[in-house]
């Protein structure tokens, strides 16, 4: 009887250890999990009740609003390219963004709006430049995309993007420190891991 109890205890301990080892394999960039395995281990959160956020400036010049929507379109170009593991296409989108920023008519802003925009313009240009120049280094592109996303988040919250924008979060990127991004759709398409963990993430809020 005593021997059977010891055998049962040993078997249980073995199973618990195996689970612990399996969980330790669900890391970030660099692990060798297949897409299917990763998605099983990081299921999409349903987020039935997503917080809705209103933009700060509801009165924006019509031409300016159209320009900002185009700017957001360039951001989405980069985001979707990274989600598809396409560094070359991400570089193309970033170059288009950089060119667009140089020609944006800032006279369409009110003085208060321009002060808000000017706080982020140079940083946005910097990240677009880095992504555009690194078509052969998707890891570097993703690092700058995470920073670009933070800048775009504040711009979209301030001026909108002509459409609902979803604020998403990946908890595993950057050594599990996490990173955010913006999306035109509610469905999670992770730009930080691409096919490795396409569905990893959750929707934090929607900016209306």
Image (cartoon, helix red, strand yellow):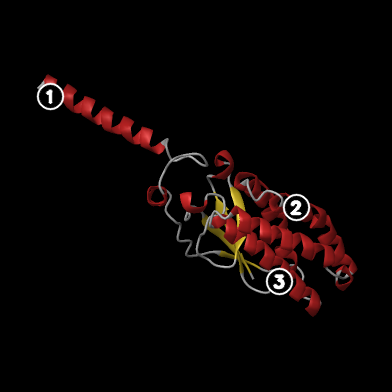
Tag 2 residue: 129
In this rendering, is residue 20 above or below 186? above
- The answer to which of marks 3 and 1 sits earlier in the sequence is 1
Q: Tag 3's secondary structure?
A: helix
Estimate how packed mark 2 is, as few (under 14), some (14 to 19) or many (20 or more) residues with alpha carbons within 10 Å: many
Q: Quadrant of residue 14?
A: top left
Residue furthest out toward the left: 1
Circle on res. 204: none
Q: Examine the rendering and report whether any part of residue 96 can be seen.
A: yes
Q: Tag 2's secondary structure?
A: helix
Tag 1 residue: 4
Estimate how packed mark 1 is, as few (under 14), some (14 to 19) or many (20 or more) residues with alpha carbons within 10 Å: few
Q: CA distance from mark 2 to mark 3?
A: 20 Å
Q: Nearer the viewer, residue 113 or 80?
A: 80
Tag 3 residue: 69
Badge nearest the viewer, 1 or 2: 2
Q: Residue at x 59, y 41 (%)?
A: 174
Relative placement, left or right, of 143 versus 12 is right
């Amino acid at each position: 009887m005593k021997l059977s109890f010891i055998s049962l205890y040993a078997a249980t301990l073995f199973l618990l250890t195996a689970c612990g080892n399996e969980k330790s394999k669900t890391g970030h960039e660099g692990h060798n999990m297949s897409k299917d395995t990763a998605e099983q281990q990081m299921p999409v959160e349903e987020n039935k009740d997503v917080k809705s956020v209103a933009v700060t400036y509801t009165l924006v010049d019509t031409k300016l609003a159209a320009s900002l929507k185009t700017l957001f379109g360039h951001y989405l170009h980069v985001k979707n390219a990274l989600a598809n593991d396409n560094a070359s296409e991400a570089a193309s989108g970033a170059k288009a963004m950089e060119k667009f920023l140089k020609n944006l008519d800032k006279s369409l802003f009110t003085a208060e709006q321009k002060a808000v925009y000017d706080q982020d313009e140079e940083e946005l240009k910097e990240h677009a430049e880095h992504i555009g120049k690194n078509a052969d280094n998707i890891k570097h592109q993703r690092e700058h995309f995470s920073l670009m996303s933070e800048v775009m988040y504040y711009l979209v919250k301030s001026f909108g993007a002509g459409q609902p924008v979803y604020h998403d979060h990946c908890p595993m990127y950057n050594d599990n420190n996490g990173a955010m991004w913006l999306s035109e759709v509610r469905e999670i398409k992770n730009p930080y891991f691409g096919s490795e963990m396409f569905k990893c993430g959750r929707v934090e809020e929607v900016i209306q």
